[in-house]
Amino acid sequence: MRYVSTRGDTAPMPFSEAVLTGLAPDGGLLVPERFPNVADRLDAWRELSYVELAQAVFRLYVDDIPAEDLDAIVADAFTAFDHPDIVPLVDLGDFKVLELFHGPTLSFKDVALQILGRVFDYLLGKSGQHLNIVGATSGDTGSAAIYGVRGRENLSIFVLYPNGGTSELQELQMTAVPDANVHCLAIDGSFDDCQSILKSTFGDLAFKARHRLGAVNSINWARVLAQMSYYVHVCLRSEGPAVFAVPTGNFGNIFAAIAVREMGVPIKRFVLATNENDILARFFQTGIYRRGAVRQTISPSMDIQVASNLERFLWLRFDRNPARVKRFMADFAKSGEAALGDGKPTDEGVDALAVDVSDTKEAMRDIHERYGYVADPHSAVGIEAARRASRSADGIRPVCIGAAHPAKFPDAVIEAIGHQAQHAARHPRLDRLDAAAARRTVLPADTQAVMNYISENASADE
Ligand SMILES: *Cc1c(COP(=O)(O)O)cnc(C)c1O
């Protein structure tokens, strides 16, 4: 399997290169040159355990790592999950919740980042090279990335975050990790400052090459691939075609589901759910992709107005025509607005809805009252959207993505539901985090200061 760029100006490359490259050199995203049709394998796949299924899906898209090594990476990644079913499906009657938050940092990002960290370490170990991962986070991704690479020999990680701009719990999930290859950089500035420092650091190509900088952001193909297995898993256990409700920010998780539909797996519909940052909901409703101002909500991992993974969907939507992708992206870069402009729905199989903060809180309260279930604010956005969209689902009970454990967002949970949710707003993994062991370095919002720190602490090839 080779990977091509959505913008068409990059030579096709094998999986390992696609993973280490991240963004294609022409500025596009890497996509597999085809999505193998698996319709005639589904019966055989029904016999597989979750780990075996994930291994089978990976093997379809990776042919430059020996199969037994790849299987070992995938199997080992899921040992980091503490639920016997790894991704349990909880039946609440009117709908089901696919709980993806039983990994080390309690959000669905662990599914992909536990695998990606191991893939990186494996590939680097083969070539005897080191990689220094640099990323910026406003909360959740940082800890999942850190847990994916902590203690791995061939990798170091530097995470920039706004000093005082994350919740204390989110910060502690990063800073309490004791491994020497983990560096938490609290920047005296905003999340935008962190991102712009990151951009300038990667923009210094000599510096980037000297220290072998890499990224684990959500556009990495291996992250999408890792997320595809749980959609296949649910479909194999459904009576008929499935309906999925997915809370969406960067369009990563829902793109994995769309890729699974592309493989001939029976999926009836998707419910794309956003919070007030509704650029994607509007795009799927109107065909017009128009930037808005970012609003802070109680589902911060979806407070995003530019969805970095959308380009992969556009590539499919434009019949894999890079010229049309390029035109759309150029229009958007220039004016903050781009349109499909062909008068057809963005995707007939997608119902797109935005749920605001007050309706999210009301949904959390109602879900608790009716079903005795405590949903985190992100999952609640998806569940509420699924309930509103149920008319078009032909009576099929939706499978809603459980994106994060409610204990990650205790304030929102208690505010919405009250103190009867207190037990659910705690988790032993979070209780065990040791504030006394926290390590971080405070730096000014200054690119040079960050680059100096990286130079002094980067790991180098042997
Ligand atoms: C990252 C994240 C999202 C958004 O997922 P995308 O793949 O960016 O669409 C939603 N909820 C939680 C809890 C997250 O961590």
Image (spheres, helix red, strand yellow):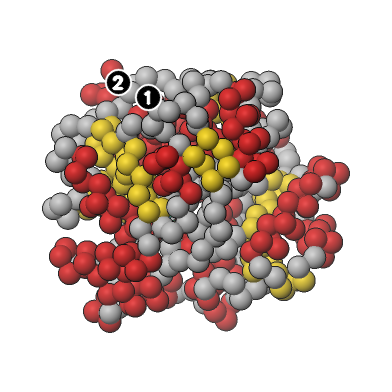
Q: Do the numbered discs 2 and 1 sit on residues whose CB atoms are within 8 Å?
A: yes
Q: Is residue 284 visible?
A: yes
Instruction: From this view, report whether residue 266 is shown above or below residue 371.
Output: above
Tell me if the residue at label 1 has its CB under 8 Å from ligand 1: no
Q: Quadrant of residue 446?
A: bottom right
Pick the residue in front: 103 or 342: 342
Q: Going 26% across and 33% down the picture, which residue do you hit?
A: 268
Tell me if the residue at label 2 has its CB under 8 Å from ligand 1: no
Relative side of 31 to 88, left or right: right
Q: Secondary structure at mark 2?
A: helix
Find residue 294 and report its horizontal and vertical position in percent. 54, 60
Q: Going 52% across and 69% down the picture, which residue do you hit?
A: 170
Residue 39's disc number: 2
Classed neighbour count for the residue bearing mark 1: other residues with Cα under 10 Å, few (<14), some (14–19), many (≥20): some
Q: Is residue 156 visible?
A: no
Find residue 331 and report its horizontal and vertical position in percent. 63, 36
Relative side of 201 to 396, left or right: right
Pick the residue in front: 321 or 154: 321
Q: Going 54% across and 46% down the picture, which residue do you hit?
A: 290
- Specify the amino acid type for callout 1: Met
Task: Give the mark nearer the N terminus: 2 vs 1.
Answer: 2
Judging by the rendered image, the residue that carries numbered circle 1 is: 263
Q: Quadrant of residue 45?
A: top left
